[in-house]
Amino acid sequence: MIDQKTMNEANYRQQFLGRFSDSLDELVGFAHRYHEETEAYDRTVCTGSIGRDEGILPATPEEAGMIGRNAKRVLEKIWDEIKGCGFERKDLLEAIRKNQPNDQDQRQERR
């Protein structure tokens, strides 16, 4: 028979530790979405060369401004969706920074 103390510990783990892991996965998913949406937009407006990371570069200051404004719009849209879910804005920004597609991932996606 399971005693009350064991039940409370199991409850604690399920409610707090389990959700924490799921929340991090969800936050990483939002970071990937940010990168996918901004890169897709960049490819529609930029006319510059392909960079080292195989992302397209802006050819003019106007293009750079357009992609910067879009990046802010995408960030705000995602933040509006998740701000009531217990995340802080800095958590989202850190996830975006830490989960940038690397060169190898982008090369494989384009093949």
Image (cartoon, rainbow, N blue to C red):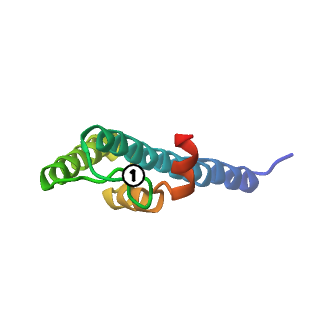
Residue 84 visible: no
Q: Is residue 20 above or below residue 78?
A: below
Q: Is residue 39 above or below residue 92?
A: above
Report x, y in % for residue 88.
34, 56
Q: Is residue 65 left or right of residue 93?
A: left
Neighbour tally class for label 1: few under 14, some 14-19, many 20 plus, Cα within 10 Å? some
- Dot 1 amino acid type: Gly
- Most foreground residue, 106 or 78: 106
Residue ranking furthest to the right? 1
The quarter of the image holding the C terminus is top right
The quarter of the image holding the N terminus is top right
- Most foreground residue, 50 or 35: 50
- Most foreground residue, 71 or 15: 71
Q: Is residue 67 left or right of residue 84?
A: left
Q: Secondary structure at mark 1?
A: loop
Residue where numbered disc 1 is placed = 55
- Most foreground residue, 48 or 98: 48
Residue 21 visible: yes
Q: Is residue 58 left or right of residue 94?
A: left
Q: Is residue 83 left or right of residue 106?
A: left
Residue located 67% across and 52% down the image:
8
Residue located 16% across and 54% down the image:
60
Residue located 49% across and 50% down the image:
28
Q: Is residue 109 above or below residue 87?
A: above
Report x, y in % for residue 92.
38, 55
Residue located 48% across and 45% down the image:
29
